[in-house]
Image: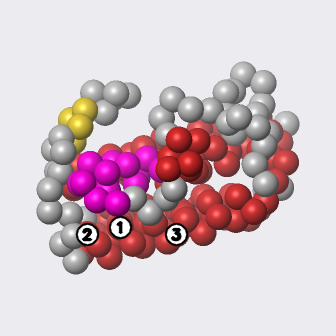
Amino acid sequence: MDFVFKVLNNTRGIFKKIIEENTLEDLNKIPEGFNNNVIWNIAHIIVTEQLLVYKLSGLEVSVSNEMINKYRKDTKPDGAISQHEVNEIKNLLISTIQNTEANYKAGVFKTFNEYTVSTTGNTLTKIEDALQFAAVHEGLHYGYILALLKAVKS
């Protein structure tokens, strides 16, 4: 699992850099032909990892219910968010994945509730499946974010 955590940490670092290198306006902009924005995608990957890893393991998540309801699957932005919220998302990018890695290494994840992912049809049966799928999910959203940034900057 060391490699999966390397991938997740690297991807989170890339997302952090994207936040730092783009304006609040660009992070919030929904280009024509898209139904969400860069910052929604970044917050969405945080929420999804928390739900797949912690919720399915019967453990408490590290994000608020408000954040979950705002960025979970099948949601979309309901308006621009503030710089304060962007800063919170940026901080959660790193802290949540570091906590997950530490908890995994400490053996915190003892049980797992099987879950079939709607987008791919894959069934997650153990914590390792959830972590591997989280890496795939974040890669998919990285590609989407690159497309969004290209549209925002044109």
Residue kind at label 2, given as amino acid type = Tyr
For residue 134, the mark is: none
In which quadrant is the N terminus drawn? bottom left
Q: Residues within 10 Å of mark 2 (few under 14, many from 20)?
A: some
Residue at point 32%, 76% (across, down): 102
Residue 147's image quarter? top right
Q: Residues within 10 Å of mark 1 (few under 14, many from 20)?
A: many
Tell me if residue 56 can be seen. Answer: yes
Residue kind at label 3, given as amino acid type = Ile
Q: Is residue 51 left or right of residue 10?
A: left
Q: Nearer the viewer, residue 96 or 141?
A: 96
Task: Give the structural element (helix, strand or loop) at label 2.
Answer: helix
Q: Nearer the viewer, residue 113 or 128?
A: 113
Q: Is residue 50 magenta?
A: yes
Instruction: Check contact, mark 2 vs mark 1: CB within 8 A.
Output: yes
For residue 104, the mark is: 2
Q: Residues within 10 Å of mark 3 (few under 14, many from 20)?
A: some
**Residue annotated with mark 1:** 100
Q: Residue furthest front?
A: 65
Residue at point 54%, 63% (across, down): 93
Q: Which residues are magenta?
A: 47-60
Tell me if residue 150 can be seen. Answer: no
For residue 94, the mark is: 3
Instruction: From the top left corner, tell me how far across and down residue 144 is, in percent.
Output: 59, 38
Q: Is residue 66 left or right of residue 109?
A: right
Residue kind at label 1, given as amino acid type = Thr
Residue at point 33%, 71% (across, down): 101
Residue at point 24%, 54% (across, down): 58
